[in-house]
């Protein structure tokens, strides 16, 4: 009788532990889905920031806008051709267009100057 009582107690404890484990697993899966959704939103935000920065560069100089887009595509293709993984190529596709972003801060008299620059004046 005592052995049966201990066996039933252990069985009940095992059932309770399995139920608790299932609840923990469900909570962990919920957290994973929330994290995945947050990562997707973050990636979309990053792409939007890059897009707006490129737009700012294009607003300043329309040739720059098309140029940075082409650079991103070429960097992506070159990375894939060179055997880099897709995630690296995607990062290049997003980052490469920013290589000329510094032009935003350069005065039009310098950026759009025709001809050669002369010697520096002090």
Image (cartoon, rainbow, N blue to C red):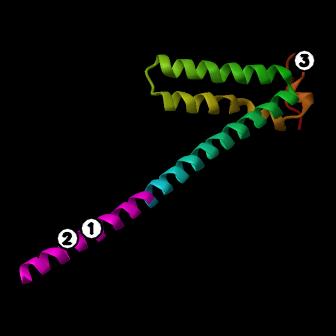
- Please tell me how crowded label 3 is: few (under 14), some (14-19), or many (20+) other residues with Cα within 10 Å: few
Which residue is under mark 2? 11
Name the quarter where the N terminus is drawn: bottom left
**Residue 6 falls in image quadrant:** bottom left
Which residue is under mark 1? 15
Local SS, label 3: loop
Mark 1–mark 3 CB contact (< 8 Å): no
Of residues 96 and 116, the one drawn nearer to the viewer in this rendering: 96
Local SS, label 1: helix
On the image, the x and y values in percent for residue 121 come to: 89, 33
On the image, the x and y values in percent for residue 31 come to: 50, 57
Q: Residue furthest bottom?
A: 2
Magenta span: chief secondary structure: helix
Locate residue 53 relative to residue 71 in the image: left or right. Answer: right
Q: Residue furthest front?
A: 1
- Please tell me how crowded label 2 is: few (under 14), some (14-19), or many (20+) other residues with Cα within 10 Å: few
């Amino acid at each position: 009788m005592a052995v049966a009582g201990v066996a039933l107690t252990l069985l009940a404890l095992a059932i309770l532990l399995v139920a608790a484990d299932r609840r923990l697993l469900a909570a962990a899966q919920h957290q994973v889905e929330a994290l995945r959704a947050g990562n997707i939103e973050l990636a979309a935000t990053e792409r939007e920031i890059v897009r707006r920065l490129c737009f700012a560069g294009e607003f300043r100089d329309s040739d720059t806008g098309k140029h940075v887009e082409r650079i991103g595509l070429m960097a992506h293709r070159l990375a894939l051709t060179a055997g880099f993984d897709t995630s690296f190529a995607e990062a290049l596709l997003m980052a490469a267009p920013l290589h000329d972003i510094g032009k935003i801060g350069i005065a039009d008299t310098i950026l759009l100057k025709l001809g050669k620059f002369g010697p520096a004046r002090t």
